[in-house]
Image: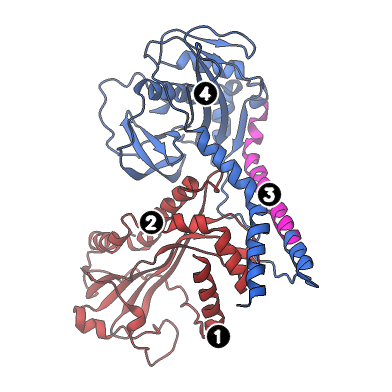
Chain colours: A red, B blue
Amino acid sequence: MSYKTGLALAAIAVGLGGCATRPPSPVSLAEDSLNSQTGRLGVAMTALPKVDTEFPGAACLLCLAAAATANSSLTAHANTLPYEDLPKLKNEVADLIRSKKKANVTVIPEDLKVGELADYGTVGPNIARKDFSPLKQKYKIDKLLVIDITALGFTRPYSAYIPTSDPKALLRGAGYIVNLNNNTYEWYMPVIITKSADKNWDEPTKFPGLTNAYFQALELGKDRFFEPLGK
Amino acid sequence: MTPQSLRLVRSIAGTIVPMVFISCAQAGNDAVQAGQAPPRVIGKDSNWSLRLPKEDKVVYRGVVSFDGAGVGDQKLIYPAPNAIGFLAGVITHGLIVGSVKDSQKQKLQEAADKVLLPYQSVLGSYKHPELMRRALEKTLTGGSKKLVESSEKPGGDWLIESATVFSITQDQTAIILDNSVSIYALNVPSAAAYQNTVTVVSLGKEGTDLASFWTANDGEKLKEESASLLAESLDIVLSEMASGPGKEGIPYKTVRYFEGKTEKMERGQLVSERCGRVLIKTLRGGLMSVPARPGAATAPAADCADVPSSLK
């Protein structure tokens, strides 16, 4: 995160702080939720985020600027890291569900833009905030499994100007299944993977320890998505 | 942002932050540079000596994870009668947090080391001369080889210095060796011809009372496994030196393996797969020999006699 980006994001965060919505509560995947009798399942991913750094706790403008400056070398390195085979995750998930659950699965080729969906009129437990129902007609599916990875790279917590931890590799997101007949979650699983570097972390410019941790986080994140779907 | 604020940002970034990070950065640079000594090619039948360290005690510790390390957010209001007072507050905060972080890591390591409690009597009597003598008998690379005292003048063509740290997994199913190796050509003894770190992960052991398994018969299993790991690490560096550089073109991949019963991953270049072992060149340039995943089809080898039976 550059110095200017840090300042801009801090200003936006302050402005929008009151608009933050609570993430949905986790919903376990029922055993009979996916099988050959439960209709057609679409599997989609949202666009992968830029591999970047974040500094939670550096809450004031100057704190965020100081954190961005102090970690600029790590940020520059993070921006060069590849996704590896993460874009293929939806295909791997689809293959896993086909083989384990015998479900009728369709992979949605394009990135899902959840933010562009209209808000759903009804609010309630396990009801998706966005209206996914138009996707039923569009993709000829009954349920939609979404892999939504929202943060990739490195996280370093701060207390104002001071880092309270070494940087760690990060993969954060959620996997969920929406029943398109009633717009409810049949599965919602938040995923947060953090991995520390073995031994030293501060090895500019290639940061081998943290880079290793980043690729470990990618693998662990994929495993986390696979785990409930492969039972 | 006002000019005063900008000056404050520069001041914080330019004064406090480097002070907090400079020691870590220096340590990291040293580590990277240490692995970049230009290797020379060693003949496969060369004679070599292994030098005993000055310290008798072999270092063992428990495998620790720092994934959960961190101090947590502390809401703090800096006393700021003026800019100097503010900076003093930030510096004090940094020193306190740094101290707490160090202390936390130390406590995590101490907690991990508790896995060694059943092994104290064995580890207390297992010294470097015995470890290295056993390991030397197991090595297969090179011509004649001998163990030399730290003060003794070595013979042969090459001298190897080895600094070992063994770790035992928390489930006690596996032992891991981190061996920092320096190899000197005896005609140029002033500078290491080759330096690298080799990590060797043992095969996971099955059983319910593994402490008894390792410590039975005065710790014979533990001693033999440790010596096998050391021998494997020496054979790896000698083979690496014999083959010379040339691994630049190997693509990077994330290799999965088991450390005991725990699945681990390492990013690196896959140097070789044979006899149930996988050799990786890590992102730091070190070498890592790990058990192949169960069921993985490692490249067939006509003869696996050069791999210790405890490792394959």
Name the front one of labels 3 and 2: 3
Label ID, residue A223: 2
Q: Earlier in the sequence, mark 3 or mark 4?
A: 3
Residue B105 belongs to magenta span: yes
Q: Amino acid at mark 3?
A: Asp
Against A109, residue B271 (above or below) is: above
Q: Amino acid at mark 2?
A: Asp
Residue toward you, B88 or A115? B88
Residue toward you, B310 or B181? B181
Give the left or right position of residue A187, taking residue A197 as reference. Answer: left
For mark 3, what is the residue?
B102
Q: Residues within 10 Å of mark 4 (few under 14, many from 20)?
A: some
Name the front one of labels 3 and 4: 4
Say which chain tag 4 marks. Answer: B
**The magenta segment:** B92-121
Against A176, residue B271 (above or below) is: above
